[in-house]
Amino acid sequence: MALDSKIPNGPIADKWTNYKDHINLVNPANKRNLDIIIVGTGLAGGSAAATLAELGYNVKAFCFQDSPRRAHSIAAQGGINAAKNYKGDGDSVYRLFYDTVKGGDYRAREANVHRLAEVSANIIDQCVAQGVPLAREYGGLLDNRSFGGTLVSRTFYAQGQTGQQLLLGAYSAMNRQIGRGKVKMYNRHEMLDIVIVDGKARGIIARNLITGEIERHSAHAVVIGSGGYGNVFFLSTNAMGSNATAAWKIHKKGAFFANPCYTQIHPTCIPVSGDHQSKLTLMSESLRNDGRIWVPAKLEDAQAIREGKKKATDLSEAERDYFLERRYPAFGNLVPRDVASRAAKERCDAGFGVNKTGEAVYLDFAAAIERYGKEAAYVKGLDANDKALVTKLGTDIVKSKYGNLFQMYLKIVDEDPYVTPMMIYPAVHYTMGGTWVDYNLMTTIPGCFSIGESNFSDHGANRLGASALMQGLADGYFVLPYTIGDYLAPDIKMGPISTDLPEFVEAEKAVKDQIDRFINNNGTHSVDYFHKKLGKIMWDKVGMARNEKGLNEAIVEIAALREEFYRDVKVPGSANEFNQELEKATRVADFLELGELFAKDALHRNESCGGHFREEYQTEEGEALRDDDNFAYVAAWEYKGKPSDAVLHKEPLNYENIKLVQRSYK
Amino acid sequence: MKLTLKIWRQKNAQDKGGIVDYPIDGIEPDMSFLEMLDVLNEGLINKGEEPVAFDHDCREGICGMCSLFINGEAHGPDRGVTTCQLHMRMFKDGDTIFIEPFRAKAFPVIKDLVVDRSSFDRIQHAGGFISVNTSGNTIDANTIPVPKDDADKSFDAAACIGCGACVATCKNSSAMLFVGAKVSQYALLPQGKVEATERVLNMVHQMDLEGFGNCTNTGACEVECPKGISLENIARMNREYLAASLKG
């Protein structure tokens, strides 16, 4: 099967407008006759559910949490990008487009990214109209901050809780439609398979997580907005329940899975403290606006700090190595995430790490506190040389910007980051790879769409900060509502789809069989035991730096672990009750397949780009070395029974507007 | 650390339920409270017993899913945190810890420590929104300036995570801190003023239908709220409600 990305013809700036002018529309009376299922209620799924219901479709939305408001978009901290150019610092749709393609290390699809940049400004208008309390300046207008990988200030924010506020905005729009009966909400439900009738997606099988009942739901189209697969690493900044099951089930029924190896390791997370660790906590990238990253310049100082003989504050300026500022003078601490993560790993691998495990670097706010403090003292006509006063004033300002993050750090680490520098280390955060979709956001299963983090399309090999929220809302509010109408137009006379069709019966049986198998397995180890083992293989061999030998080993080890899992996993309780271990088992079963495909994809991509770093392919300075002649394509994998049998399809990436060059932030 | 856990076990909504004792050893001060429960559950599974069901998801204090009543306090003894951010360094070796679900008529128990908080969702369905379509064809975001102080106060109210600690803490099981926060978020913004009258009437009506109690100004909700939502929001809701009632 040849991949058709369905990119419209014409100049890039006109593609989306021309597309919208020529698609099929469904008239309002007919929309009432069409049902749409949406799986996942984060920024993408939630905004899509609200918008499609407003347009008149009958929407059924599903989430595994106890309320759609708890989807993990809620945890996004720093902000959302939009090409508003409110600051007058030279921003434009083109610059946001360019920054995103460059930030993605030239592995994203130009047409999709341009569309994203075009609709970005509308998102801000929309959210403000919905009552989202974004940060404002004293004049009453919206404030912006800077994020990594850009030279303009285009990030809108709500303290360190931007994701929460945007998600509550989408949730409120959904609530309005739930109240009107246009969205039927299924909380605590998990999709366990997709149903395909005559080659088209026509429904799902879901488990009611409270009663254990297996339910059939039909629709004219199915939309997957279930997020990313970072939890394949066990430890990540994702929520405990974040999973790839919906995305993986559609993959097994015909949706190609693209670029699984493109995973973002976020540079600023709280380091691991011990074996009991269940998840990792992010400290927003926005902190790099004001925090300076460093390690001791001398190995003996690093060792003394690790042994507790010295403190960070004991070292003078000359004894510190601000390695990002040293290596990347132009962008400094605001280099993109992949670059910052690798630089931190490089220093720690060389022995300069600053916590007990040797896997941590400092993020220091002392300079920012002093700078803000002096400014505030000047404005208030106070003595800018009074050190204690300056520190107090500066601390207050830093608190107003990042208060919740500092509090979070204090609670977890038990150290006050206003006084001693934070310790941070990279952690798995976001997955750029995901279900392959065409320009319409449709997967290779007709009628099955994939939006937000669960698709692959906009971020290439590395996502820029504050772009995930932008993409989720762009897909849900402004893109899918057009493209899905074009698909559904021929279905207006079809009528409701029966859930008694043999395809539903068969899919339901397969789901029940899998559940029974887990319940009756009576093995010796818990699901977490296997999940942690998988995570360790992934982090050690398919993590921040990969090589051929390690990847080959990982593939073998994951396949063996999967067999052991099916043989020896123990799932207590029964199928017909609230059973959290059973929920975990069905999710980890899918991670155990996805992990192997992930490694296979990383092994085949003989280059380094963005979040995918192969040790064999680097420049003399240790930067990622791309191979545009051989790898400027999207790797879309077709399921053939086992991950090792997956078949590769290539979508060539044609850059008509941006010239491919080696990414430089120096 | 060695601890004795006294945990509420209840098979399902129909079951009567009761406290069961679990001794536990090897707990480290750096563990979060939920990681301590992970350790307990891993041990129970290995022994062939059923693990304790508890709600949790983001484990960074923002999703509002975790909901434990620990030693008689919502989210435990620390202030300004959810249970997932509560660390074991708040406890001492040898402590006995009572762990119960959030209790309220409007939060029925599903299993063990898991409760059904969909009553909160239904209050929001009744009016927790601004009726603007998501077409994107609105006015430019900077057309209406909003005083920074109002925007900040609106944000402070909007920071509510909907966990229900306020309800569980209140002797009347009142949801007025939660509803007050939502009403305030919109009431403080020009965009929210257009529908202010219907919003507060509809949300309060639904709140009463769900069986939440009334506010008697004890203020315990504010103390236990992990996000520091202020009691002022209740006062603001009462003013909004009175004004709306007079308008009819």
Image: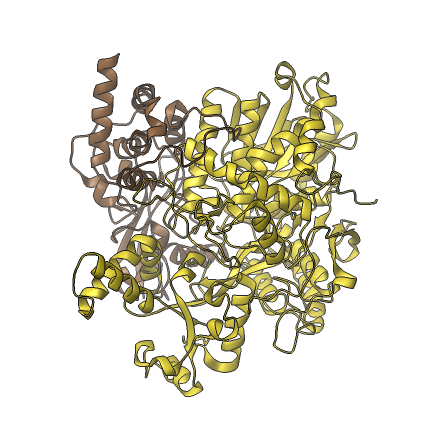
Classify the position of the N terminus of chain A by image quarter.
Answer: top right
Q: Position of residue A16 (x, y in %)?
A: 66, 36
| Side of B123 where A39 appears, left or right | right
Residue B204 horizontal/vertical position (percent) = 29, 23
> On screen, A143 above or below A399?
above
In this view, the residue in front, A352 or B221, is A352
Occupied quadrant, residue A104: bottom right
Residue at (28, 67) in percent of width and height: A370
Q: Residue at x 48, y 63 (%)?
A: A334
How many callouts does the rendering have? 0
In the figure, A411 relative to A117: above or below?
below
Q: Colour of chain B?
A: brown
Confirm whether residue A585 shows in the render.
Answer: no
B162 sits left or right of A443 in the view: left
Q: Is residue A312 visible?
A: yes
Q: Which chain is yellow?
A: A
Considering every residue shown, the one lying at the far bottom of the view is A300
Colour mode of the rendering: by chain
Viewer-proximal residue among A271 and A284: A284
> Where residue A253 sits: x, y (%)?
73, 41
Of the pair A606 and B44, the residue shown nearer to us:
A606
For the C terminus of chain A, the quadrant is bottom right
Q: Is residue B20 above or below residue A321?
A: above
Looking at the image, the residue that sits furthest to the right is A1
